[in-house]
Amino acid sequence: MVNRRKEGCFIKPAGGKELKVNGKIIDRRCDLKDGDLVEVASLKLQFYLKE
């Protein structure tokens, strides 16, 4: 689940699938930065923040 707050965007695991950000397994909230690579199961997405 990706969320946006005034302090920035973050992702947290949901649904029991393994979540990785930039190759590291995430088990709690993780702040996202422009260009981060997000992986859920076999799906890979690159996060871009457009102001």
Image (spheres, helix red, strand yellow):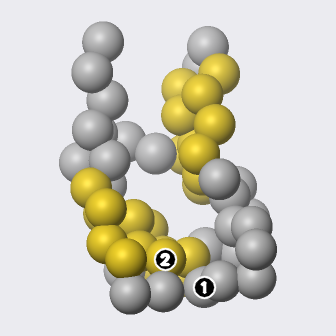
Quarter of the C terminus within the rendering:
top left
* Count of numbered tags: 2
Question: Where does residue 14 sit, x and y in percent of width and height?
Answer: 74, 67
For this rendering, which residue is in front, 43 or 11?
43
Q: Secondary structure at mark 2?
A: strand
Residue 37, image quadrant: bottom left
Q: Secondary structure at mark 1?
A: loop
Residue 38, image quadrant: bottom left
* Visible residue check, residue 22: no
For this rendering, which residue is in front, 42 or 7?
42
Question: Where does residue 15 sit, x and y in percent of width and height?
Answer: 76, 74
Q: Are marks 1 and 2 in contact (CB under 8 Å)?
A: yes
Above or below, 10 against 22 in this view is above
Horizontally, is 11 left or right of 16 in the view? left
Horizontally, is 20 left or right of 17 in the view? left
Q: Which residue is mark 1?
A: 18
Question: Where does residue 21 sit, x and y in percent of width and height?
Answer: 43, 68
Q: Residue at x 59, y 45 (%)?
A: 2
Of mark 1 and mark 2, the one earlier in the sequence is: 1
Horizontally, is 50 left or right of 19 in the view? left
Question: Where does residue 45 sit, x and y in percent of width and height?
Answer: 31, 62
Horizontally, is 29 left or right of 24 in the view? right
Q: Residue at x 31, y 72 (%)?
A: 44
Mark 1 is surrounded, within 10 Å at the Cα level, by few (under 14), some (14 to 19) or many (20 or more) other residues, namely some
* Amino acid type shown at disc 1: Glu
Q: Residue at x 65, y 53 (%)?
A: 1
Q: Give the CA distance from mark 1 to mark 2.
A: 6 Å
* Amino acid type shown at disc 2: Val
Residue 18, image quadrant: bottom right
Mark 2 is surrounded, within 10 Å at the Cα level, by few (under 14), some (14 to 19) or many (20 or more) other residues, namely some
Residue 40 image label: 2
